[in-house]
Amino acid sequence: MYPRLGVGHLNILPTGPQIDGDPNFEQYFADLERWNFDIAYNAFYAFPMGDVLGTYQAQYRKFTRMARERGIPSCVQIQSVVAHLDDIPLSESQYYADNTCHVYEHFPGSGRKYHFASFASEIWLRFLKDLSTLFRDFDFDWVVFEEPMMRVDVPGTMDRFHERFRALYPGMVYPTRFSETVEYLTVQKAKRDILVEFYDQLSGHAKRAGFKKIGIMPWFFAPTFENTPAETWNSCCDIGRLTFLQNMDFVVVRMQPDNIYAQVMESSNGECVPELAHYECLAHQSGKPIIMVNNPSDEHSPEANREDSLIPLAFFTRYTLAATAAAPCGMSRHWYNQNRQADHAHMELMTHTNDMLRRLGTPAAEVAFVFSYSGISHAYPRAWRDVWKGYWNFAQQILEGGNFSFLTFYAESLAHHLQQNPQVRVVVLYEFMPIPPEEVAVLERWVREGGERRILCIGGRNGYRWDHAHGFETYRLRPPEMFSLCGVDVEEPVRIASLESTTKVEFVSNFVSDRVFSVMSFVNSATLCHPRFLPDAEVDVVYRTQCEGLPVVTRRRFGDGGEAWFVGVSLDGPVFTSPMRRIVRTLLGYEQEQRRQLVLESGHGIYHSLTKNGFFVVANTSKDRNQIKFSFPQSLWDAPNTRMIRALKSLWMEPWSVRLFRLLGPETRILDLEGCVQLQQIDEGESEVLIEGMFHREFRLLTNSPVLSVSGPEQLRYVPSRKFRKHFVTDMALPEARDVRVLLQFG
């Protein structure tokens, strides 16, 4: 067999400027290569500026020089919320409502004091800008800003936020506590806006300073009590808006195995399981490259500082496989030059999965659930952790045995999401996740422009509006403005059709393909509601209650365009078996077999993603052997085993295993790529193929026919295609790892 090239990907290996036992980073770079990491990644964790300019400066410069000698990018991660008290005074801290702030020793016994800086502080912003410039002078190529998050719920009057808020809303009374009032909700919105503005300015400065790529590591998506406001767990970290900042190139997903293992996360069903990594990773898949944090070391337990403090291998394996199946562009592990022998099995697994991530690209899911930070900012009737349950229940129905996947879109970023994900055909709106009126118009244009596009509005009660004037305390409840897409009169409250756990409904549509419930038509939901419709709304009733004849499932057609469906069920409650999976399958055309579903059947613990680059990754996180059944209409390329599979109807997955394939169509020329850092896209035509991405010094194309010519940057060199078995190999070379566009001509 021909020798495989060293693989490349967005896998990062974070370390610090000074690690015991490896002062010259020799062991670090050796591990980076043997474990299939390829971004040299160092960190600034709120060190005193005196140390950065003194002891650590030579180390940082040595690190970037060694990366440059190896032709790989170097990246620095900058802690952007925790400040060292020697450099940033407490006047710039985040203050609680009682005007106290959190001061602590991050490294117990060190005597060094830290606090959480305010995103309304000009002094803190200027400090981080100057720090970014300094690290660019140290010759780092990339930068990542770490952990944007609010630690306090209602900032105190000593917080710089207070003066900013009074300037923005001069006539508004400033709230003093967690409460469901217009003033409180306005504070939450202002916190989100000021945080996003902070990183917009910071990333813009980093770009002007000369960093080639800029990343963000948002705080967790799933609820966590770690470093978040005790009242709400709401960090006000708007992942959507941060991701789509103009100068933001990629996202690092903050979660790691020990967060789940230490039970600091919430999964709404009681137990934190490692498969939560799949959900967290998917929640960041907005269209830009993402890197999933991983780490075999346990940094949460009391034994965290021991040499053998490792996450149990079975737990780590399930986490790693579940994350891999969500198709990140890379993973990380923290490198402290410890656990060198004990972590062998952990790193053997990561070396294997890192190999697969190099060319996946982003998931090509056809379903998107719209998440709203406005919706999770309420105090009652449902606060963040309660609203989360509706999202979680939907996600579980789709991902656990649903045999297809979904993306998370974010309110206030919908236009970006839709542009980045043209493959999406069903957008799901949930009553407690409102969107602004201008995005209602965006969705209406979107659904009108595509005959197969569907909007699914789910609601068992009135939910939350974007307009805070109709809050719970006013007792003037109204349905969300976005339900107008279904023809609902959003100025009239929805009515409860049934509070029974099981309600009999009857199917009244003329089209069998509309049957979103089972033939028996019993609906299990905590509530069943029916809205009032606008007089001129052309709405078809699909289901109504059998006794009263109240419409609970309706469809609105948009001429030659798509449809908007209203399903009046709850997504949570003591009884939740509402058939979200069947409803979504029906709207996709799978239920009546109008369209072919890729995965027909799979066992417990199977997770998978189809990506925009045509790769299909599937993992079995179970200790049991599992079968997965397909409806592949085309051939497949088994990437790790470099072989063609002409027909694959089913596949037995070994316990704790992962497989990777590329789907091959009539015009497919590219079978696989080796040596790419991050494959952005493959655009295949009849006789030419355009490839975009970041590639290592050496990379290789595997094709099903010979490449006749190659066009690319002037420094690109290539060796003419040679045949190997039943495919062709073309080797290429660059002076250093870089972003390139390569145009290939075929016969």
Image: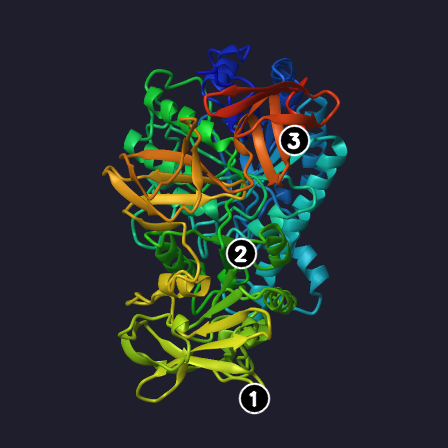
Using residue 621 as the reference point, say whether residue 141 is left or right of it: right
| Residue 24 versus residue 544 in the image, above or below | above
Q: Residue at the spot x=27%, y=43% of the render?
A: 627
| Residue 101 versus residue 188 in the image, above or below | above
Q: Give residue 273's quadrant in the image.
A: top left
Most extreme residue toward the front, as rendered? Answer: 747
| Residue 309 versus residue 29 in the image, above or below | below
Q: Position of residue 362 (x, y in %)?
A: 53, 43
Q: Residue at the spot x=32%, y=52% of the render?
A: 401
Q: Position of residue 534 (x, y in %)?
A: 56, 85
What's the residue type where badge 3 is placed?
Answer: Leu
Q: Which mark is residue 424?
A: 2
Using residue 528 as the reference point, say whether residue 122 is left or right of it: right
Earlier in the chain: of badge 3 and badge 2, it is 2
Q: Which mark is residue 744?
A: 3
What's the residue type where badge 1 is placed?
Answer: Pro
Q: Which mark is residue 535?
A: 1
**Mark 3 and mark 1 in contact (Cβ < 8 Å)?**
no
Number of marks in the rendered image: 3
What's the residue type where badge 2 is placed?
Answer: Val
- Residue 500 seen by the camera: no
